[in-house]
Image (cartoon, helix red, strand yellow):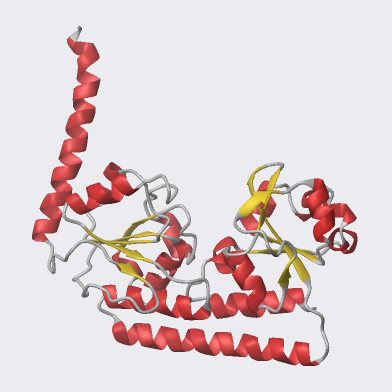
Amino acid sequence: MSSRLLLPGLLAALGVALSLALGRAAMRDADGDAAAGTHAGAAAAHSGPIAAARVVCVGGALTESVCALGAGATLVAVDDGSTFPPSVRDLPRLGYQRALSAEGLLSQRPTLVLASPEAGPPAVLAQWRDAGIDVRVIDAEHTPAGAEALITAVAHALGRDAEGAALAARLRADVARAQASLAALLRAGRAPPRVLCLYARARGTLHACGEGSAMDAMVALAGGVNALAGLHGSVPLGGEAAVAAAPDVILMPRGSAELSGGSSAVLEEASLALTPAGRAGRVVVMDDLLLSGFGPRTGQALEQLVRELHP
């Protein structure tokens, strides 16, 4: 076989080997070389903080938490779902959190990776750990307490426990304010609106979110009722199902609404125009991460959704 045909393959192999070597070397030189990542729930223990000079986040709520804790300058790369605050949009991107590559991250020479449970594939996370990188998978429930637990876990990993306690206190205050507003509305006799939670993977392919989703959790917190109660997970939305759901409000992340051509185009899909929400033109669109992230802005998201569902 011609050496010119072999050369590209050899160069690619050498590139991967060099990336792995650099990752191992960086971790040998990093202060506080820690054990492999841990899973952190509301009451789970975390491994100790490290001297995190170079941090990578895979998960929008994690990225947002790092910045809200005043550690945004330590970030060297994020996943595509990390869209807030605006300062992170210029950082190197690792791609979609479920389809990561080892080489893309290793080239950033991180000392700490904070990842959501959706980060993967698992073999890639294993490669990062094999390279000596401290990978911590931080899991939290879709509740205000879960958001607080996430903040606490991130703060501890960064050695910023005091900042974490202060941020968690602000989150609690935001949530309490939203809950007080909702309580006043319910005392006034407002009926809980039926909400159809939709998202789009591509133009013309709407999916409905059932129980257990982040949007479902936020709707319940805001005093709404999922119009597809009893459905678990998500399913493609059909015309008959949309009409039968009889939603008062349609709720969508902004990215999905834009992908679908805007609110007016959404109402033309799957017989949604025949629903109470369609006839009233009630489509609520919120920022993707704000609506479903359950991060530091959970209280602000709840306040906004309460206003939108109970005008």
Q: Is residue 110 visible?
A: yes
State left or right for residue 143 relative to residue 18. right
Image quadrant in which the C terminus is located = bottom right
Q: Residue 40 falls in which quadrant of the image?
A: bottom left
Residue shown at 88%/64% (left/top)? 280
Picture coordinates of residue 231 (x, y %)? 66, 59
Residue at the extreme top of the image, as rendered: 1
Residue shown at 30%/83% (left/top)? 161
Residue shown at 18%/50% (left/top)? 130
State left or right for residue 195 relative to residue 52. right
Picture coordinates of residue 9 (x, y %)? 23, 22
Picture coordinates of residue 159 (x, y %)? 25, 78
Image quadrant in which the N terminus is located = top left
State left or right for residue 30 relative to residue 156. left
State left or right for residue 138 relative to residue 215. left
Above or below, 151 against 277 in this view is below
